[in-house]
Image (tube, rainbow, N blue to C red):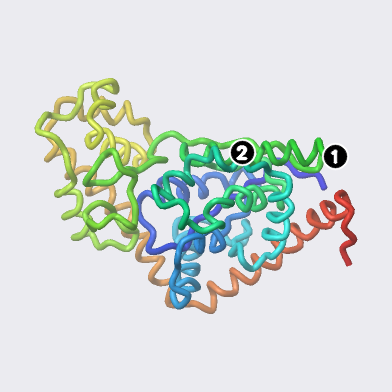
């Protein structure tokens, strides 16, 4: 099978979606669907590397699909599905476990960050997460993957697996997938600490903007967003030394589809009170329609389930074709 310009990317169903999920991933997916053949999945297998409530997992999966559609991803043009419903992902992941080397996995910095000091109690799934991610990508022969800075190492791992498999079995089946790295707003930081990534797990609700936040809630969160006592920075160099100011300016730039340096020029030397009002207005205008549409879609779960079923069927056909080739290459007979 020969493909070109095909994308695979996914979002975990680990809770309500926030501004970081939108600016860091979903907003870019909307733009990419016009240039690439796109497979967008809910990576529920990755989610269970840490404990998930079984009663909530399927509902959270629907929420991600609803957010995709509410943000402008066309379910007729793209393949939307949840990872666990296409078993070829895990079948290829086992094969990749046998191709990858322990030393490669031991170098993965994200495992060290997530496992912390208690890595002996981390799940094996969290450790081998990159091999499943490689299978997610290569089971569709994806040529490109949109990644944030924190995922670049995982994509390098995917390229290493593809190259080693191709070399070991003297084939050219798997592409060396290229990263698509976006600029403005791809790493959205906490509103309470400009050095920490925006996260659902942060103890403070004021650290993040949720996609279903009301306008009044957004107003309050931006008003309380941490800043310093100085006027807004005059240039990019100064902004880079002031993490909270830089984060808010980057968010503004991403929402407005301009460069961060242009946002800095627009507000250089002005007071935060003026800037925060403009940021709030822009955020409400962007986020509120998405949140409203998510709520509307969540009231029609039969529709969302039909999207997931259709996506599963289409993804399975593509994945099975690749797995059949892999089985033939390595000497398995697939009935």
53 w.r.t. 288: above or below: below
Is residue 159 or residue 237 the one in the foreground? 159
Is residue 246 or residue 204 the one in the foreground? 204
Residue 200: tell me if it is visible: yes
- SS assignment at label 1: loop
Q: Position of residue 119 (x, y in %)?
A: 45, 51
- Looking at the image, which residue is at 28% across and 49% down? 283
- Looking at the image, which residue is at 47% across and 65% down? 66
Residue 297: tell me if it is visible: no
Q: Relative to 250, is 134 on the left or the right?
A: right
Residue under label 1, please give it.
171
Q: Position of residue 177 (x, y in %)?
A: 66, 38
Q: Residue furthest left?
A: 229
Whether pointer 2 and pointer 1 mark residues with C-beta atoms closer than 8 Å, the reply is no
- SS assignment at label 2: helix
Q: Position of residue 210 (x, y in %)?
A: 31, 58
245 w.r.t. 285: above or below: above
Residue under label 2, please give it.
103
* Res. 260 image quadrant: top left
Q: Relative to 190, is 41 on the left or the right?
A: right
Tell me which numbered mark, 2 or 1, is placed earlier along the sequence.
2
Tell me the distance, in whole angstroms, between the alpha carbons under discs 2 and 1: 24 Å
């Amino acid at each position: 099978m020969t493909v070109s310009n095909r994308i695979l990317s996914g979002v975990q169903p680990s809770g309500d979606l926030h501004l970081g999920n939108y600016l860091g991933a979903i907003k870019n997916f909307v733009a990419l669907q016009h240039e690439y053949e796109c497979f967008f999945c809910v990576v529920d297998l990755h989610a269970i590397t840490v404990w998930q409530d079984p009663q909530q997992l399927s509902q959270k999966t629907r929420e991600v699909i609803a957010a995709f559609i509410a943000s402008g991803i066309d379910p007729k043009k793209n393949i939307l599905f949840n990872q666990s419903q296409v078993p070829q992902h895990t079948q290829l992941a086992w094969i990749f476990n046998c191709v990858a080397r322990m030393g490669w996995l031991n170098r993965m910095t994200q495992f060290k960050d997530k496992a912390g000091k208690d890595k002996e109690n981390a799940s094996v799934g969290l450790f081998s997460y990159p091999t499943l991610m490689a299978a997610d990508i290569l089971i569709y022969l994806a040529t490109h993957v949109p990644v944030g800075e924190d995922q670049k190492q995982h994509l390098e791992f995917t390229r290493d697996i593809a190259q080693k498999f191709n070399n070991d079995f003297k084939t050219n089946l798997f592409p060396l997938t290229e990263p698509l790295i976006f600029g403005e707003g791809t790493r959205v930081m906490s509103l309470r600490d400009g050095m920490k990534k925006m996260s659902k797990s942060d103890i403070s609700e004021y650290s993040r903007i949720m996609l279903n936040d009301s306008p009044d809630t957004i107003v309050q969160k931006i008003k309380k967003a941490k800043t310093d006592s100085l006027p807004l920075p005059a240039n990019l160099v100064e902004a880079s030394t002031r993490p909270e100011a830089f984060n808010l300016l980057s968010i503004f730039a991403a929402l407005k589809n301009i460069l961060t340096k242009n946002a800095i020029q627009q507000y250089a030397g002005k007071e935060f009170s003026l800037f925060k009002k403009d940021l709030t207005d822009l955020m409400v205008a962007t986020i509120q329609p998405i949140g409203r549409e998510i709520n509307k879609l969540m009231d029609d779960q039969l529709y969302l389930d039909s999207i997931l079923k259709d996506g599963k069927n289409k993804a399975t056909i593509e994945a099975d074709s690749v797995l059949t080739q892999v089985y033939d290459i390595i000497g398995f007979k697939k009935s």
